[in-house]
Amino acid sequence: MPTDNKLEPIQAVERAMMILESISHKGSMGLNELHNELKLNKASLLRLAYTLTECGYLDKNPSTGIYSLTLKPYEIGLNAVQNLDKISLISSTLADLSRETGRIAQFSVEDKNKVLCLQSIGQREPSFSVYTNVGRRSPLYCTSAGKAILSTYSNSDILERWDSLDVMQLTEYTLTDSTKFLQDISLTRQRGYALDIQENEYNVYCVGAVLMTHMNTVMGAISISGNTLTKEEEHEISTLLLEASQRLSTIFGFVTAK
């Protein structure tokens, strides 16, 4: 039986994939457009397009002869997204962030009006922060992960939930006034990331950003925690964090609105 390194790709399959990818980028294409872009023989293109149409991957407009994708490729992609080992991908990203920043990197989700830490990488001192421990719940309103998640809600939704968040003054920096909190959330939306500047614990500074799903819903948030946060550090950390969160969200199927 031949091994993988002795096999050669099937040309017809390669070309069929090229057709699907080209149409997915353009939205719809005719045979002439496909010929001009892919430089393939028109007779071969016609047979391949016919096969893809018969198999349910393409739809052909009988009046114009224009091809477009059906929902079948989307269905396959959706199944692939749903079957990804998301936690493994997130864990690998957290490890990279922790190594690059020298800080603690966490993944947390919203749970019962709290933020629940599911992963924490880079924690060297057990007493550094309670909420960086896996399995611990912390407030949504004063952690970077929680605030990042709340920033995806409308202001009216946040106000409706305000009382249920059990807001209390944990440090002198905790935002307990709803108006000031919404101002901070507005800044979070503008930046794309949330900040916790000693709001949950003294001497703990965190930057957080949300992870989105293919359903345009929040999966959770990743955050980076340390004992300092200068403006330069904030810029460097937020840049790394946003790149990581956007990359993961894209892998999970999230499409940014244009």
Image: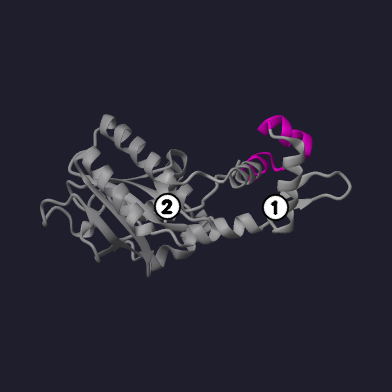
Q: Which residue is mark 2?
A: 2
Residue type at the position of mark 1: Leu
Asked which quadrant contains residue 30, the reply is top right
> Closer to the camera: disc 1 or disc 2?
2
Q: What secondary structure do most residues of the magenta stretch adopt?
A: helix
Place of residue 110 in the rendered image (x, y in percent of width and height, measured from the top left): 38, 63
Give the extent of the magenta segment: 20-39
Indicate yes or no whether the magenta region holds residue 166: no
Query: In the image, is 94 to the left or to the right of 186?
Result: left
Q: Which residue is mark 1?
A: 52
User: Residue lying furthest right in this view?
Assistant: 63
Q: Residue at x 34, y 59 (%)?
A: 87
**Mark 1 → mark 2, Cα distance in angstroms:** 28 Å
Q: Is residue 155 above or below residue 188?
A: below
Place of residue 248 in the rendered image (x, y in percent of width and height, measured from the top left): 42, 48
**Sequence-wise, which precedes: disc 1 or disc 2?**
2
The N terminus appears in which quarter of the rendering?
bottom left
* Secondary-structure class at tag 1: helix
Query: In the image, is 140 to the left or to the right of 24?
Result: left
The C terminus appears in which quarter of the rendering?
top right
| Label pair 1/2, CB-CB below 8 angstroms | no
Indicate yes or no whether the magenta region holds residue 33: yes
Place of residue 18 in the rendered image (x, y in percent of width and height, measured from the top left): 62, 41
Please state which of residues 88 and 202 is positioned toward the viewer in this rendering. Answer: 88
